[in-house]
Amino acid sequence: MYFFTEKIQRLKMGFPDYIQALEEERRKIQVFCKELPLSLELVTQAIEACKQQLSGTTSEYNLNGQSECSERTTSTEGPVLEEFIPIKKRASSPPCCDEDDEDNEQHSLKQSVLNENNDSDKRKSDWLRSVQLWNPDPPAEEDATRKVPGMELKRSGSSGGAFHPFHKEERAAKATESLCKAPSSTRVAAASSSAGELTPEKNLNEGQRKQRRCWSQDLHKRFLHALQQLGGADSATPKQIRELMNVDGLTNDEVKSHLQKYRLHTRRPSPMVHNSSSPQAAPFVLVGNIFVQSPEYAAVATSTASREVLTVAAPAGVYAPVATHPTPVSQPSADSIKKPQFKKFQHSEHSNSDERAHHSEGAVHSNSPTSSTSTHTSTSPGS
DNA sequence: ACATTAATAT
DNA sequence: TATATTAATG
């Protein structure tokens, strides 16, 4: 979360306040203690650490002498992962996992900081921002204006317009339906009962193009969650995702499309970076005076299966990549998910563009270690 | 039948 | 330009 703003925090608010902030953070996380056990732990420890500094010897909190920005989140090597697990992005929406939704007043602060050395981050947030575009009022607790996305934009805003949901006087018949449902409750509850209102509204007017599906934050969140459970965008299939999301109106195509976009954006946000020297890129962050695996990273890492994780060589060896296993979050039933078998990338071989640009690393593609997939042949297409 | 990619529309 | 939808292809 705000790990890398930590310094700033300390500077600007001072320990006491910082601690307070931490505590608040902890409260927020507490809700997700099941899913973010580590985070909770981290924050707690951080608090302790700070307190100690405060009370006793201000001894050494200066362990960061060397590293500055840990925001190098985007490294060439960790393509997708860090990519989407923006540890901050808070500015707009927390797409990463369903767990983070604490936003604070630090925005501006972060903003400025980020601006300094984060372009890649910008990119990330970029398209995410768009996502939130659909639903500009997500966690806003109050704000009763829970507008139904059916007709608000009518305002001829003209300006950024970017997208008009369904303006135009098309066939107004369009039942606003649940295309964009307000994220009233991020709970998965709705999902629980598949029998609930699974109304497959076969709306009439099937002549024209489908109404654009707006990917609200909630929706996207679910998307990510599902993705996570399925072990990453590369191994998840639209269908599976859809099932996991358990959103009634959602169609396969829509998920597919979204997935496409997601992959597109995650794949190569920016050709730059490089940073191979500083370990910052590593999934470990410094909290208080201990090193830990970044929660966000962990969150994804665990689910995404190791694959890319194992490549991180711990500098000191102190903290080895704990390839902790996928924390069994709450799998649907283990029935719909089928082992992610790595897909063969089928790039276009022709190309004259980048392509071999990144092989880098030498090393290892170790694909396999994880799990015991082994013989798994999935025969039985049944066809 | 399903998944991925490309094209197209908004 | 970016994102969603539709078509095409593996």
Image (cartoon, coloured by chain):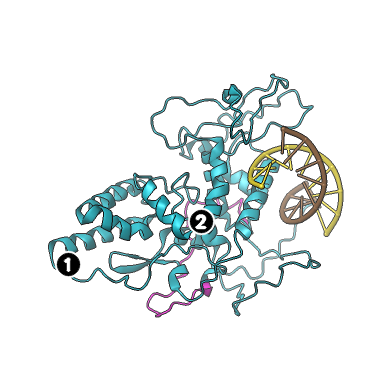
Chain colours: A cyan, B brown, C yellow
Please report, as a chain letter, where disc 2 is located.
Answer: A
Q: Residues within 10 Å of mark 1 (few under 14, many from 20)?
A: few
Q: Residue A150: where, in percent of width, then height?
A: 60, 25
| Sooner in the amino-acid sequence: mark 2 or mark 1 | 1
Three-letter amino acid code at the position of disc 1: Thr
Q: Nearer the viewer, residue A354 or A334?
A: A354
Report the disc number at residue A143: none
Query: x, y (%) of residue A355?
Result: 72, 69
Identified by mark 2, the residue type is: Asp
Residue A259 in the image: state x and y as whole percent.
65, 49
- Could one spot residue A205 in this view of the protein? yes
Residue at figure coordinates x 24%, y 58% from the top left = A47
Q: For the residue labelled by badge 1, is the local secondary structure a helix, a strand or a loop?
A: loop
Q: Quadrant of the N terminus of chain A?
A: bottom left
Left or right, A173 with respect to A283, comes to right
C9 versus A306 height, above or below: above
Q: Could you say which is closer to the camera, residue A127 or residue A22?
A: A127
The residue carrying mark 2 is A121
Residue A152 on the magenta segment: no
Q: Do residues under tags 2 and 1 come within 8 Å of each other at their CB atoms?
A: no
Q: Which residue is mark 1?
A: A58
From mark 2 to mark 1, how far is it between C-alphas?
34 Å
Q: Quadrant of residue A77?
A: bottom right
Q: Is residue A291 above or below residue A382?
A: below
In depth, the one of A369 and C2 nearer the eye is: C2
Magenta run includes residue A311: yes
Task: Name the residue rendered at 65%, 49% in the picture.
Answer: A261
Residue range (magenta)? A310-338
Predominant SS along the magenta part = loop
Up-down relation of residue A182 to residue A2 (above or below): above
Q: Secondary structure at mark 2?
A: helix
| Chain for disc number 1 | A
